[in-house]
Amino acid sequence: MESITKNRQPAEVLRAMIERAYGAERVPVGDGWASELGHGWFNVAYRIRLRDGAEVVLKIAPPPAVEVMTYERGAMSIELHTLELLRTRTTVPVPAVDFADRSRELCDADYFFMPYVDADNLGIVGETLPAGQRDALMSRLGSVNREINSVRGEHFGPLAGPGHADWRQAFTAMIEDVLADGERRGVDIGWDYDSVREVVAEHADSLDEVTEPRLVEWDLWDSNTMVRDGRIVCVIDHERAFYGDPLIEAGFAGIGISAFGDPAPFMRGYGQGELTGTERTRRHLYCLHLMLVMVIETVYRGHTDTKQYDWARPRLDEAMALLGRTRR
């Protein structure tokens, strides 16, 4: 996926990063030792073969001159923090961090190295699998996501703070950040921005039912799930985590918007039964938040085609309809 947030670096800079992380004796020589992993949408990531044959991944944050959405600021620090939480407080399979550098001495952004995971991306291979095997993997992803959500926080909102005492404050602040991002860049969301704010305010009391902050990934799609031999061997890309309501997780998105696929296998593995009316209202708010992000981020990414925007805009209308607003 092409995006102006991808901070590509020349070979000599990559070699300098490798030397700092692994030592001069492991710096590769010749050609063909680095290739870009093109599936991601935000950071650039390289698959690198070290001189001794070991394979690693280098992930580099966006250039500081490129404007990102408010919630994406400091995303690499969020990812490193989340990886540490998951390694120390769960059994969820996540990449190790071999080396992280926030000095900005070798390039203009933070970066880190991790071992390369030799596995298939479920988002890519999922449609080629027998339905039963895919459902089993999505069910397992549900149980993995539940374990992630078992980590309790001290506040709602960003992992490192500033936090909020309650979920209503945290979520409404999150969605206001997204709306303000869209207004700042003049993004056409198909609705008056204040009408979206009104819808959120009308249903915000449903958020008060959430009283315990839990670690949520928010971005744990099948495309961030690595599988091998019918098992989940790693979950990747943790830069959007925060403390909030587990019902905001990506695996539940299909409850309100069918284009995200059948959520039943994920919910079965998660152990989530039929939603109550209040839970369903919260889930609709979370669909609205997601679709706003997907529409507005196309401008911040500098997408050269309109494919994502054209897909997400009608879904935003669906999300508004779920909350009682339709076009006259």
Image (tube, rainbow, N blue to C red):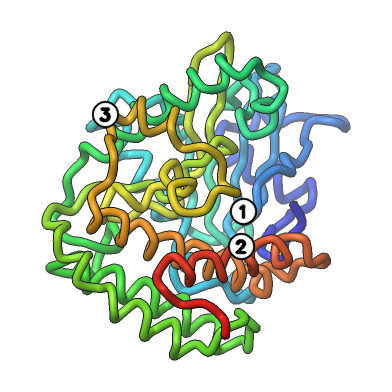
Find disc 3 in the rendering and name its residue: 90
State the CA–CA distance, disc 3 to disc 2.
29 Å
Q: How many marks?
A: 3
Toward the viewer: 139 or 150?
139
Q: Are marks 2 and 1 in contact (CB under 8 Å)?
A: yes
Q: Are marks 1 and 3 in contact (CB under 8 Å)?
A: no
Percent of width and height locating residue 194: 44, 90
Find disc 2 in the rendering and name its residue: 62
For the view shown, which residue lies furthest in the top direction?
229
Above or below: residue 160 compared with residue 97: below
Comes first in the chain, label 2 or label 1? 1
Q: Residue at x 57, y 85 (%)?
A: 328
Q: Is residue 292 left or right of residue 83?
A: right
Find disc 1 in the rendering and name its residue: 43
Which element carries disc 2, helix, strand or loop?
A: loop
Percent of width and height locating residue 153: 17, 51
Which three-letter amino acid code belongs to the residue tagged 2? Pro
Toward the viewer: 276 or 253?
276
Which element carries disc 3, helix, strand or loop?
A: loop
- For the residue carrying disc 2, how many other residues have a C-alpha within 10 Å: few (<14), some (14-19), or many (20+)? many
Above or below: residue 215 compared with residue 326: above
Q: Is residue 258 left or right of residue 54?
A: left
- For the residue carrying disc 1, how many other residues have a C-alpha within 10 Å: few (<14), some (14-19), or many (20+)? many
Q: Residue at x 13, y 52 (%)?
A: 212
State the CA–CA distance, disc 1 to disc 3.
25 Å
Percent of width and height locating residue 103: 48, 59
